[in-house]
Image (spheres, rainbow, N blue to C red):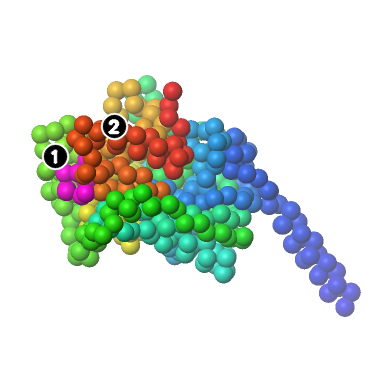
Amino acid sequence: MKRLIILAMFLCACAIGAQAQVVDTTVCAVLKNPKSFDGKMVRIKATVRAGFDQFILRGEDCGQPVDGIWLDYPAGSKAKAGPDAVLELQPAKNFSGTFAATTRTPVKLEKDKAFKQFDSALAQTHHKGSGMCLGCVRSEVTATLVGRLDGVADAAIKRDATGKIIGLGGFGNMNAYPARLVLQSVTDVTAKDIDYSKADALSSGETTTFKGTGELYDPLDAARKSIARLAGSPAGTQAEKDVDAFGKRGEHNGVSIIYAATNEEPKDAGQNKNESPDGVMYNCVFNLDRLEGQAQLLAILHMGQHVEDVRSPMAGNADAPLYIHEYNAWIMTASDAVASGIKLLIMPGGYIVWNGAWAPSDRVSNMDQALKEYLAKEALLSKPQ
């Protein structure tokens, strides 16, 4: 009997010790020095947003180029919430830089009632009227999250003197986030509806026209046909490059279209076994549950622009921050939407990037203003000085 009591006391002590290893912190504290939290179990109370190519714990006025921590579920979670599309950069077999594989402690997700409430609230989409709303979810969620924090000192892509990539960044879309939380559990879940009233009012009384066909088709071929409407314009020239970034049928150019979960920690975050022309694999992951028909074509153009910005940056743009990449990608997305006859294009949070009713003289300034507000207030990205 004495042995059983001693064993029970030992197990209790271990449980208390494990609990003590969870560090209470904040989004801003992590972003100030993400490397110092690398590998630690943390507890953070934060507001979480899912968007077109975002799934983040929001930092408010942290003063960082990216004021958010990327959120991932453990691999194989099969949950619903998350971004519509992401670009994940990975070292190829012939990567020119140095790469050290990182072994991280696996996290098991607790799929309890609180998590199901959390995941469900972030997965519900918002769509009314005739406009297309890319990545628009109905609610944001405030909760207390516990998970493994992965952090790097610098998420910037490193290049040598010739411009070749020799070091990749952090986590999430374009590997641009210096910190990632791999979720273990959530508590204290509170959902709040996002205000889409302005966008809804513009499309009130009209019928939704873009629901997708559900048919199997070649998305790249469809994208090429879609951008043909832009031929002869500067936007058309760039759109051709964005679609060509994926290569021709059967060509192995290091860029892949992957239909899979966009909300999970990559199963293989190490070095890829295949080679790529520039030593980097560009994995464009799409969530087909959210991207059908025209929305999928716009997503391909958006991700193609991301690939182009990294692989073949414009002069002076090699070290551009995520703000510039997102601005460029949304401009191309909106350009194709305009050429496709979409009357209203809405970004997450209800920001209107295109309205066919705008006077021609106001279109450029209105689009620019909407993008800057979205990037600052929704995407939480700082404009470079």
- Tell me, yes or no, whether the highlighted magenta stretch contains residue 7: no
Examine the rendering and report whether any part of residue 161 can be seen.
Answer: yes
Picture quadrant where residue 370 is located: top left
Q: List the single residue furthest toward the right.
A: 2
Q: What stretch is highlighted in magenta?
A: 335-343
Q: Which residue is drawn at 29% across and 37% down?
A: 367
Q: How crowded is mark 2: few (under 14 residues within 10 Å), some or many (20 or more)?
A: few
Determine which residue is flagged by label 1: 230
Quarter the N terminus occupies? bottom right
Q: Which residue is drawn at 43% across and 42% down?
A: 379
Q: How crowded is mark 1: few (under 14 residues within 10 Å), some or many (20 or more)?
A: many
Picture quadrant where residue 309 is located: top left
What is the number of the mark on residue 263? none
Element at badge 2?
helix
Element at badge 1?
helix
26 horizontally vs 348: left or right: right
Between 170 and 384, the one lying in front of the other is 384
Where residue 332 sits: x, y (%)? 25, 39
N-terminal of the pair, mark 2 or mark 1, is 1
Quarter the C terminus occupies? top left
Where residue 350 sits: x, y (%)? 37, 48
Residue type beneath disc 1: Leu
Determine which residue is flagged by label 2: 365
